[in-house]
Image (cartoon, rainbow, N blue to C red):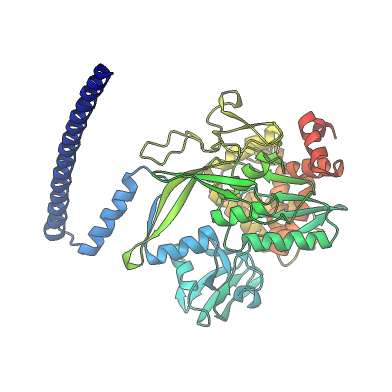
Amino acid sequence: MSGFRQTRTVVVAAALAAAAGVAIVVGMAASRQSKRDERDARLFDEVRRLVATRDVDSISDDSLFVKAANGMVSAIGDPYASLFSRTAMAGFLRNDIGNAYGGLGMSLERQPGGIAVTGVFQHSPAALGGVMTGDEIVAINGTPVARLPRDRVSQLLVGEPGSGVDLTFLRAGITTPIRTHFVRAIVRPQAVPFAMVIGDHTGYIPLQRFNETADSEMASAVAGLKQRGARSFVIDLRGNPGGDVAQALAVSNLFLRAGQEIAELRQRGEPAQSYRARIPPLVRSEPVVLLVDHYTASASEIVAGALQDHDRAVIVGETSFGKGVVQSLFNLDGGYALKLTTGRWYTPSGRSIQRAHTFDGAPDTSVNPLADTAPPAHRPRYKSDDGRTVLGGGGITPDVTVASDTLTSAEQHLAREFAPKAAQTRTALFDVARGLRTTVRGDFIVLPEWREAFYRQLRASGVNVDRATFEAAEPWVDRLLEQQIATIAFGDSSAFRRSAPSDAPLQRALTMLEHASTQSQLWSLAQRGVANGL
């Protein structure tokens, strides 16, 4: 025993000596780091002083510091990090998140001739004042805006509710400009622009963004559709880029039982946080299909991942974008705000759906963010509640894969011709539709002269597609024209009704729901592949 004690004493003494040595090494390393920081700080201050006092083009110290801060944010390798000024922050919350703001309620797009109105929000000052999709803004308070960037025009339109602004428009079919006075009001962009019952019992809800009202709008849409007889649901997340994570959690809770995990957040230096459904679901047992595509991202993928892992919805469509990281906003002095990627989120099965995008200083190695980073056989595999295999590491992989638009070889050829001039193609399409807005009826069909007008506009815009290529893809051209004309003339819901019969993922979802009265029956169809033959 005494020998054991002696050995232990020696070991303890050695350990203490080693610890002291480690402390000395750590202290020396910290001292060296401190000296490097001091040296780098002196370097920064010397460069700043010389630039401020000796450069031929003077610049204010404030601007130098802001530029340096922006440079620091750019240098960390976080593709989602941004330093916002007060104005830029307001634009981010308004345009990217879709939160309420003081303004008129219009979506704008820069066109070669000026600023075009591409959408008008319901019940907004713009809608009540008669603004129409397709109008062109030429002046604000008498100041021409044709040469101003779209963001600058947007800034001129927003302002305190109750304040006034004068706009001058051009409208197809009217030769004289339209001058109107508007009073700004609180505008609330809609997360759910419409909802409808398709067929006898399927409720269709397009969820376009996760803004501050996404949860309440979804709940209202579900309740309204139930009152109209909906016994199953299609939730369309295609094109939804995400937004407020808290809203994604709340929307998920509409379909999941209280206590079920929705997502887990893991951040550097902090314990993992598990987010769970808190209240009973609004959609308790009705079968649900979620539609996703390559542009379904971020908060949208939280919802899709949670419902897929808990076997609560069949995912139909194309593999989603694959953004499994979380950004946090930090308020700074002077009205600035810093957006940083602060963590990764994981689905209830433990999978990360993040692609090769990185946020910890390493380069983004993804060649194409819309392509899988690895084939399914090489991606990590996880299990849903019922034991189904679900994939991680490359977006949300659908349970039933259906391409959004299957084009013929001739149509694919034309699409490739359009691709390098996408903006000009979109403008040409928009111009033709704008010119037809006041003349078409709800049951219109695309006429040859409209197709010819589109071709002429393409050529005039520098899209030099040859006649034979254009005519060989006539069915696709007609679908493009039909969708744009219907949207401008009659709004989103009417355009949706016209496009629904040719919407392959939606039709697959509807067919499956016609043959399934429960979620388990729906899963049976999806797993056995019966849906392919229905």
Q: Position of residue 429 (x, y in %)?
A: 63, 53
x%, y% of residue 394? Answer: 55, 34
- Which of the image's four quarters has the N terminus? top left
Q: Is residue 483 visible?
A: yes
Give the position of the C terminus as an image quadrant.
top right
Q: Going by the image, does 9 lie left or right of 101?
A: left
Q: Quadrant of residue 381?
A: top right
Q: Nearer the viewer, residue 26 or 92?
A: 26
Residue 293 x/y as whole percent = 64, 42
Q: Up-down: is 199 above or below 324?
A: below
Q: How many numbered circles are shown?
A: 0
Residue with the most extreme top position? 3
Q: Quadrant of residue 406?
A: top right
The answer to whether residue 218 is above or below residue 530 is: below
In the rendered image, the residue lying farthest to the front is 1
**Position of residue 238 measured from the top left corner of the image (x, y, whole percent):** 65, 47
The answer to whether one can see residue 450 in this image is: no
Residue 225 occupies which quadrant of the picture? bottom right
Q: Residue at x 68, y 32 (%)?
A: 409
Q: Between 153 and 286, which is closer to the camera in this rendering?
A: 286
User: Along the line of sight, which residue is nearer the eye, 190 or 10?
Assistant: 10
